[in-house]
Image (tube, helix red, strand yellow):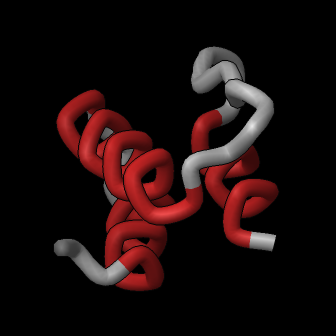
Amino acid sequence: MICLATCLAICLANYRATCRATCRSSILAAYRPKRQVVYRSSPPADILLALQ
């Protein structure tokens, strides 16, 4: 499994669809949020919120 911190750093540095998909799947798999987060307007911000 990809380190979430590393993945987050990559996402913030290199905003690409493949990275967004990887981060989203990694976070969803790791945290299983009760509430679905919409990764549409600002994925990095959503990721930061998910990590809190």
| Residue 7 drawn at (x, y percent) | 34, 69
Q: Residue at x 59, y 25 (%)?
A: 39
Q: Quarter of the image holding residue 14?
A: bottom left
| Residue 24 drawn at (x, y percent) | 42, 42
Q: Pick the quarter of the image with the C terminus.
A: bottom right
| Residue situated in front as seen by the camera: 31 or 10 | 31
Relative height, residue 4 to residue 33 (above, below): below
Marker count (numbered): 0
Q: Residue at x 45, y 63 (%)?
A: 30
Is 6 situated left or right of 19 in this image? right
Relative height, residue 36 to residue 5 (above, below): above
Q: Quarter of the image holding residue 42?
A: top right
Relative height, residue 6 to residue 14 (above, below): below
Q: Pick the quarter of the image with the N terminus.
A: bottom left
Is 49 situated left or right of 46 in this image? right
| Residue situated in front as seen by the camera: 13 or 43 | 43
| Residue 43 drawn at (x, y percent) | 60, 37
Q: Residue at x 67, y 20 (%)?
A: 38
| Residue 20 drawn at (x, y percent) | 36, 39
